[in-house]
Image: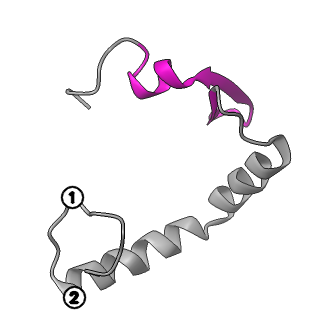
């Protein structure tokens, strides 16, 4: 993992990193995640907003500023 350009915040042992990779891939391949990814591709990403998938199945575009700032509540207490 040292050759990766992405720097991980977590310092995981090789065994733990492999287990996390398996979990992450399994989660990404669930039917719900596949449906959300397909929907994102149909809608298209824009540079001025992010897409939120609501629990009722609808979507909402939100500004990047609001999304990254936790809608004015900040991110320290997440």
Q: Is residue 1 left or right of residue 23?
A: left
Eye-nearest disc, 2 or 1:
1
Q: Is residue 2 left or right of residue 47?
A: left
- Of the pair 44 and 30, the residue shown nearer to us: 44
The relative height of residue 76 versus residue 74 in the rendered view (above or below) is below
Q: Are marks 2 and 1 in contact (CB under 8 Å)?
A: no
Q: Is residue 47 magenta?
A: no
Q: Residue 23 occupies which quadrant of the picture?
A: bottom left
Question: How is the model colour-coded?
Answer: one colour
Q: Residue at x 66, y 56 (%)?
A: 32
Which residue has dot 2 on it? Answer: 15
Q: Residue 47 occupies which quadrant of the picture?
A: top right
The relative height of residue 19 versus residue 10 in the rendered view (above or below) is below
The answer to whether residue 42 of the structure is visible from this angle is yes
Q: Residue at x 31, y 84 (%)?
A: 18
Which residue has dot 1 on it? Answer: 9
Residue 13: x, y in percent? Answer: 15, 81
Q: Residue furthest top?
A: 72
User: What is the C-alpha distance between the residues marked 2 and 1?
Assistant: 17 Å
Q: Residue at x 19, y 63 (%)?
A: 10
Q: Residue at x 36, y 69 (%)?
A: 5
Q: Quadrant of the C terminus?
A: top left
Tag 2 secondary structure: helix
What number is the disc on residue 21? none
- Of the pair 55 and 35, the residue shown nearer to us: 35
Q: Which segment is the magenta one?
A: 49-71
């Amino acid at each position: 993992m040292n050759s990766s350009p992405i720097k991980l915040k977590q310092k995981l042992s090789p065994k733990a990193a492999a287990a996390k990779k398996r979990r992450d891939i399994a989660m990404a391949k669930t039917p719900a995640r596949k449906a959300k990814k397909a929907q994102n591709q149909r809608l298209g990403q824009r540079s001025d907003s992010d897409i939120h998938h609501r629990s009722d199945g609808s979507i909402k575009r939100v500004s990047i500023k609001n999304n990254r700032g936790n809608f004015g509540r900040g991110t320290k207490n997440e």
